[in-house]
Amino acid sequence: MGMLEKRRTAAVHRAPFWQRLLHQWDLQILVIPSILFILLFAYVPMYGIVMAFQEFRLGDFPGASQWVGLKQFAALMKDPNFGRVLRNTVVISLLKLAINFPIPIIFALFVNELRHERFKRISQTISYLPHFISWVVAARLMFDFFSSDGGAVNQVLVGLGLLDAPIPFFNRGEYYWALAVFTDVWKEMGWNSIIFIAAIASVDIQMYEAAEIDGASRVQKLWYITLAAIRPTIILLLIFTVGGLLNANFDQSMMLTNQMGNKLLQEYADIIDTYVYRVGISQARFSYAAAAGVFKAVINFALLMGANMLADRLGESALF
């Protein structure tokens, strides 16, 4: 019976593509919604790239707008505010890369080392919960938490003698970058650690047992077995993170600045995405907004390719 099944499987693999497609009709039906979703929300919007080279106006027939070449990109580069926007985007993204990327890995290692199963589950659950809170609610919590009028952070700092008087964090632009990093860690640390916890769970337990017999300490097992085993996962996620470096979290910036209504924070909080929304879309400069989006996409693509090439040259697990 086993041989017969193998022969049938081999015959299916040798069959023409359309015949195999019909043979797997039930599986293909399950995939169709995902394919339609990708086509509708990932490929159809790519028409917007054309708008970056046109002078698009509402009501224009698709593709029939006046062609202006690189005019929108030239205007973008000459905008005196774009340098500040690019600076904020790069700095916030680099800070998140340097701080927010390793923290979920450290947290996953910490959870793995816990021996009390109930405490372990509770810790994981609590860390996941902020991810499911929208940035609208999260921003409101942060306003109360960092308030200079009874906020928990100021009360603790003043109580410990670290401050003489409360600091109005959301009225001082120089504190925004730190707030952006902290709030992102609080909200996404647990969620981002899931994939690392899963990778650690797949490590062969016999490797730990063999290391223990050889006299390895807990730190040595952590370094030489756990981290070594999940290194390919870390490298792949790092490549993806670098490839999205200029995505500095639109929702976070909008909500923490009251939709850019807080002029005291705008100098440090205005990023490419909020700039596109504020200048490009709100002012109906659609082609200008498309040019800014294309600029960001090209830089992200270049960073992705560079990170992948570097990983490949170092002998790590590259994407391709």
Image (tube, helix red, strand yellow):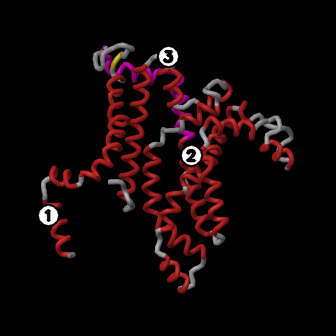
x, y percentage for residue 186? 64, 48
Where is residue 118, by image quadrant? bottom right
Q: In whole angstroms, how far apart are the C-alphas of marks 2 and 3?
A: 30 Å
The C terminus - image quarter: bottom left
Q: Nearer the viewer, mark 1 or mark 3?
A: 1
Which circle's residue, 2 or 3, is located before the other in the chain? Answer: 2
Q: Nearer the viewer, mark 2 or mark 1?
A: 1
Dot 3 surroundings within 10 Å: few (below 14), some, or many (20 or more)?
few
Residue 90 drawn in magenta? yes
x, y percentage for residue 149? 82, 35
Residue closest to the eye, 146 or 38: 38
In magenta, the rendered stretch is 66-92
Q: Which residue is mark 1?
A: 11
x, y percentage for residue 177? 63, 39
Q: Which residue is mark 2?
A: 96
Which circle's residue, 2 or 1, is located before the other in the chain? Answer: 1
Where is residue 13, by image quadrant? bottom left
Vertical order, 280 against 191 (above or below): above
Which circle's residue, 1 or 3, is located before the other in the chain? Answer: 1
Residue closest to the eye, 310 or 185: 185
Residue 212 relative to residue 114: left or right: left
Residue 80 relative to residue 258: left or right: left
Vertical order, 246 against 319 (above or below): above
Q: Residue at x 39, y 56 (%)?
A: 311
Vertical order, 148 against 132 (above or below): above
Q: Residue at x 61, y 59 (%)?
A: 124
The N terminus - image quarter: bottom left
Residue 271 relative to residue 138: left or right: left
Q: Which residue is mark 3?
A: 283
Q: Residue at x 42, y 20 (%)?
A: 286
